Image: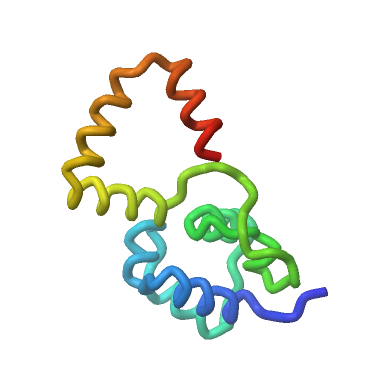
Amino acid sequence: MRKYTFAQRLEEIMKIKNITAAEISKALNISEAVISQYKSGLYKPKQKRLELFAKFFNVNEEWLMGYEVPIENINNEINFFDFKNLMTAYEKNETIRKISKKMVELPTESLEKIMIISI
């Protein structure tokens, strides 16, 4: 059963992720005016755009549509926020830069084992 609107969920996830309409606009190539219309509830996104928002925020599409389901997306894809946080850490931490350079030199099999362990 749907309890919330897309507009409410969009506002909520923007607060959770601490992201602005301008940042969404730039990342997804959607005008700020359209995002404003989504936030106001004037328009709802079509399926393809809903998928884009869900992937961008790494949330469950059904949650974003307003259904009472868990917020988290159960896939293991890296999302915008993971990547942004990773790059920030990389820029600020010499140890992380050294580790990442060493990891690039590892054989694929070793990297796959590391990925399995980290999940």
Q: In screen coordinates, is 59 left or right of 81?
A: right
In the image, residue 99 above or below residue 36: above
In the image, residue 66 above or below residue 26: below
Residue in the picture at 46% in, 73% down: 14
- Tell me if residue 38 can be seen: no
Quarter of the image for the C terminus: give it.
top right
Q: Position of residue 96 (x, y in %)?
A: 25, 41
Q: Position of residue 43 (x, y in %)?
A: 58, 77
* Closer-to-camera residue (89/10): 89
Please tell me how many numbered marks the rendered image carries. 0
**In the picture, residue 47 is in which quadrant?**
bottom right
**In the picture, residue 111 is in which quadrant?**
top left
Q: Position of residue 26 (x, y in %)?
A: 32, 61
* Closer-to-camera residue (71/38): 71
Residue in the picture at 58% in, 59% down: 59
- Tell me if residue 85 can be seen: yes
Quarter of the image for the N terminus: give it.
bottom right
* Colour scheme: rainbow
In the image, residue 113 above or below residue 16: above
Q: In screen coordinates, is 90 left or right of 78?
A: left
Q: In screen coordinates, is 76 left or right of 14?
A: right
* Closer-to-camera residue (34/115): 115
* Outermost residue to the right: 1
Residue in the picture at 65% in, 60% down: 61
Residue in the picture at 36% in, 57% down: 27
Q: Position of residue 84 (x, y in %)?
A: 33, 53
* Closer-to-camera residue (75/62): 75
